[in-house]
Amino acid sequence: RVRRSRVDRAATATKVSIIFNFGTHNADNDASDSCFLKRMGRGVWMRDLRALIVDDSSVMRKIVERSLRATGLNFSEVFEAGSGVEAMDVLRVENVDLIVSDIQMPHMDGLEFLRQMKAANLAPGVPVVMIATESSSDEAMRSVEAGARGYIRKPFTPDQLNDRVLPLLGGIA
C-alpha cells in the first residue's frame, strides 16, 4: 500500500521563500514542466517538489519525510513505499524529483531497486540517496555503482540528510 501525503502549499511557500533564493521564472518551461510552478514574489518562481521514500520501516519513512520537509524546500507530495517492489509500482504512475531509499529491505533491497529502476527506465535523471546501517565503504561504492547520487548512514540527523539532498535538488527547486 502506497501512502501519499500533502502539505499546505501556502504555509510551506512562505517558509521557503524566506530561506532560499529560487531564481527567476522562465516562461519557456511552463508547458514542459509537469510540476506546479508557484509565484513566490515579484519575478521569483519555485516548483512544488515530489519525493519517494522507500523503507520497510514506517517509522523510518516518517523520520525521512520530516527531515526532507525541514529543508525548507516545497515538498508538496511525498510518496512512501515499503519495498523496492512497491517503489517500482509508484514510479510507473507518478513522477518524482527525489528518491530516498533504504538499502536493507525485504522482497527487493535498495540496490536491486536501483538496478531494476534503471533497467525499466523509470525516473531517469532523478537523484537517489541511499540510507544504510552498514558503515563499510563497499556498501557506499555499490550504491554509487547502482546509480545512487548520495549515501548516508543510520543513524543520521536531519542536517546530514539535508546536506546530501539540497545539492542534488539545487538545479530544479
Image: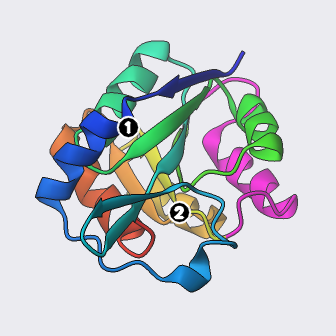
In the rendered image, residue 53, in percent from the top left (x then y), is placed at 53, 36
Relative to 67, is 113 on the left or the right? right
Could you tell me which residue is drawn at 55 percent across and 58 percent down? 143
Q: Which mark is residue 138?
A: none
- Is any part of residue 102 visible from this angle? no
Relative image position of residue 18 (x, y in whole percent): 12, 55
Residue 28 rendering spot, x and y as whole percentages: 59, 85
Which residues lie in the magenta part?
Answer: 104-124
| In front of the other: 65 or 137 | 65
When asked about the image quadrant of residue 165, the answer is bottom left
Q: Amino acid at mark 2?
A: Pro
Please, which residue is most extreme toward the right here? Answer: 120
Is 5 magenta? The answer is no
Identify residue for label 1. 9
Residue 122, relative to residue 92: is it above or below?
Answer: below
State how the image is colored.
rainbow
Q: Name the kind of residue labelled 1 in the image.
A: Arg
- Which sits in the foreground, 65 or 85? 65
Q: Nearer the viewer, mark 2 or mark 1?
A: 1
Name the residue: 81% across, 42% down.
93
Label located before the other in sequence (2 or 1)? 1
Tell me the number on the disc at residue 127. Answer: 2
